[in-house]
Image (tube, grey):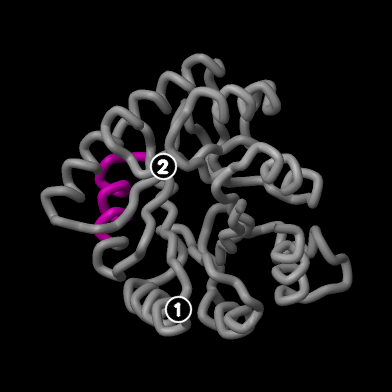
Amino acid sequence: MTEFIFMLTQHDVTVPNALEVLEKVKDTGLRYIGCKDIGLSLNQYIELFSRIRKYGMTSFLEVVTYNEEEHFNGVNLALKVGVDNLIGGMPQYTKKTLEYLREKKSRVKYFPYIGKIVDHPCILQGSIDEIIKDGGEAEALGVNGINLLLYRYVGDQKTLLNEAVKKLKVPLIVAGNVTSFEQIEELKKNNIWAFTIGGAIFEKKFIKQGDVQDQIIAVLNRL
């Protein structure tokens, strides 16, 4: 079954009222929830992930920063707040991040980006062959899965999806620009492990007159 990860984010930043939104969605049946590594104070992140654990949800923190120092600030944030899954992070830091997590004896699961990531919000560039090669190298290093910016790819998205499903063996999370039920159906047909949605929930892309809870329930009902 394909899973839905609700991200408390918009424009690749954690929304300032993330705690308030969590309280609104905790009883919708949602099982997977996360946010980005930027947007809140450390104390707010600690409280947010404490509540996520309390509500029995599985947590995700996505690293969207580019330089190495900021990247590892995000990794350390994940360790401090006790997330279940660390996702994102630039491909050039994958090996070092895995080594660091092992050194810290962390049980967090790691799903890095692959391909050439640019801009903010993040965009995926590079040839499909290069992206898949990146994925294979990440698999060989021992990642738990891959965070693929499929719908932010500047090239042929359908071919990238087909190649990723065919050639990559670890679980795939499709992140970014999932804004329609048609995309969800496409991901389900390809047995993608999970997808993230953040901004499209807040922008009411699924139920025009609905609130955040209505959007989430509508997506969950399509799984």
Query: Picture coordinates of residue 122 (x, y %)?
Result: 54, 40
Q: Residue furthest right?
A: 209
Q: Residue at x 46, y 64 (%)?
A: 39
What's the distance in space between the residues labelled 2 and 1, CA to CA?
22 Å
Judging from the image, what secondary structure is the residue with disc 2 in? loop
In-image side of 109 versus 33 (left or right)? left
Check the image and report above or below for 36 versus 50: above
Magenta region, main secondary structure: helix
Q: Tell which of 19 and 221 is nearer to you.
A: 221
Q: Is residue 75 magenta?
A: yes
Query: Picture coordinates of residue 182 (x, y %)?
Result: 80, 45
Q: Tell which of 28 and 88 is nearer to you.
A: 28
Q: Which mark is residue 56?
A: 1
Mark earlier in primary sequence (2, 1): 1
Q: Quadrant of the C terminus?
A: bottom right
Query: Picture coordinates of residue 164 (x, y %)?
Result: 55, 28
Query: Picture coordinates of residue 207 (x, y %)?
Result: 84, 66
Q: Is residue 158 magenta?
A: no
Provide the residue span drawn in magenta: 66-76
Q: Which amino acid does the dot numbered 2 rest on? A: Gly
In-image side of 205 versus 12 (left or right)? right
Q: Residue furthest left?
A: 103
Quadrant in the rendering for residue 149: top right
Q: Which amino acid does the dot numbered 1 rest on? A: Gly
Q: Residue at x 30, y 70 (%)?
A: 81
Q: Which mark is residue 145?
A: 2
Q: Residue at x 56, y 68 (%)?
A: 15
